Structure formats: C-alpha cells, structure tokens
Image: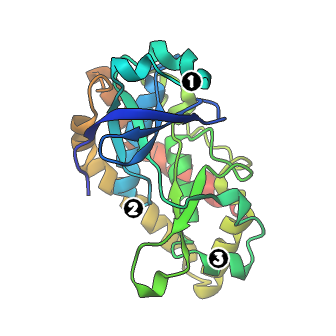
Amino acid sequence: MLTPIAQQRVRLVLDVMPTAHKPLLVLADNGEQYYLKYVQHQAYELKCEWLCHFLLRCWGVETPEVALLLVPEAVRQNLPVAARSAARHLGEPCFGSQAVPDALDSSDFIQQGNLSELDLLTNPEDLLWTALFDAWVSNDDRRASHHNLILAPDPGPAGARGRLRCWAIDHAYTFTSDRFENLDFRQTYFSYNANLVQAAAAQAVLRRWQRRNPLLWAEELKEGYYLRIEKCRAQFLAVCALMPAPYQLSEAEQTSLFYFLFCQNRLANLWAEFLDSLS
C-alpha cells in the first residue's frame, strides 16, 4: 500500500556510515533511527531512492519505511567531527531510510545457498523477485557479491518466530545512474554476471522452484514479473504524486521514466535476457 511520506525533524546525528554515500545515522523526533542521505552531487540519486521505495512496495518486496528528514540549524552546528563535511548539504530536506531493528547484512548469513540458509528466511523467493526488479530498474549496485539486502527478525505470525525476513535497501544507483531524460527504452541495460540472481542463495531458491514445478516454473516466474510491472504501471502517477519536494519529477522525467519502465518491447527483451541468464 502506498502512503504519503512522513516528515521528521532530526534531533541528533549518531554516526557516519562507511559506505559510498556516507549516510548519517540519525535519531528523529519520532524516536526512530534513520540512515540519512543528502544531495552531494546529483539530486537524481535521491529521486531514485524515493522512486524505488514506492516501486518496491508495488512490486511486493520488503523495503524499510522512509521519511523526509529536516536537519535544524542547531543540529547542523553541532555535528560529530566525522560528519562536519556534510553540514553544507543538510540545509535541504534529506532522504531517510528507517533503521530496521536487529538488522544484519545478508552477505554474512546467506552465502552458500544451502537448505539451512533458505529455511532461515520467511521470504526466500523475494531473492528472485528482487533480482528481477533490479534488472527492470537497471540497478548498478546490488550484485551477487554485494547484496544490498538486510535480514531482520520477522515480526509476522508465530510460525515466523526465530526466522529472518529479507529487506531490499540502497537504490541510489538505479536507472543506469544517469539523468532520467537520458534513459533509452530501447536498451535493457541488463548484466547477468552482476545481477543478484547469480548469488548462491538466489540460485538455490531457483532450483527449489524448478524441482517443485519442473514444467511450468519459467511461466510462473514470467507471470509474476509481468503482474508486478502492471501493478507499478497502474500506480505510476500516484507514485509521482507522492514524491516529496524538492524531489518531485518534471514532466520530462516522468515521461522518460514511463517509457523506460513500461515499454513492451523492452520488457520482453529484458525477460528473455533474464531467462537466458538462468541457464
């Protein structure tokens, strides 16, 4: 379900994370911690974060809650030493991804693709759906060797107790890592060597799916692929309307993105390339 983005004020900067964007771990007025990303070079990178949050929700893949974070002047003037270089970027509203309690890096816990690893997850098939999503949005940053996934205790019913749920994070390097107006809907931009589907755990999920339904597994995967894209297409204008200021898309950006995401020839070619990568 798509919901408007909440706005939160940052009370305290707790840490600087050692990743490419150097996000800040912050505490907000609602008592939640967020990973705050700010505009360093190109605003479209944060537009990608907002877009992929909404599209993943339509797609049915878990991703953390987000918020538009405002950093008051008093906080900007009292940053930890490691975060002071970010001060000049924090005057504008920032992207915040809510920290998931007790989250773990998936790369540390699902490496071999054995049954014990898969049985640990309550949503193992989301590895395949996430791989397809990444191919669709041309994610340059989630790879077989670098999942950009977290695992956290599943808050679901009793049957999920003691097990973990997979969440997709970090989507700044999507849509070819270029301006939306430059997207070419005639290109798939798919790299099967880098895609998450080549990870041992995703391959194990695929093998289990193939054993369960050896004749129709590909048709099931294809049907799910098109069904998820159609849900996103039906919600596309709503997604654009929910983009917070100052990250709203121009008419040119919306038009380019729409053709890139929903061009039938591109979708067919992308599916064919993805399926070929599974053989």
Contact between labelled residues 2 and 1, with CB atoms less than 8 Å apart: no
Q: For this view, does 4 lie left or right of residue 224?
A: left
The residues tagged by marks 3 and 2 sit, at their Cα atoms, a distance apart of 19 Å
Q: Amino acid at mark 3?
A: Leu
Secondary structure beneath dot 3 equals helix
Q: Amino acid at mark 2?
A: Gly
- Identify the residue at horizontal 62%, vertical 81% (top origin): 119
Circle 2 packing at 10 Å, graded few (<14), some (14-19), many (20+), is some
For mark 1, what is the residue? Answer: 83
Secondary structure beneath dot 1 equals helix
Which quadrant is the N terminus positioned in?
Answer: bottom left
Residue 271 at x, y percent in the picture: 54, 55
Residue 144 in sight from this viewpoint: yes
Residue 60 numbered mark, or none: 2
- Identify the residue at horizontal 54%, vertical 71% (top origin): 125
For mark 3, what is the residue? Answer: 118
Is 121 situated above or below 179? below
Q: Earlier in the sequence, mark 3 or mark 2?
A: 2
Q: Mark 1 or mark 3, which is nearer to you?
A: 1
Contact between labelled residues 2 and 3, with CB atoms less than 8 Å apart: no
Q: Amino acid at mark 1?
A: Ala
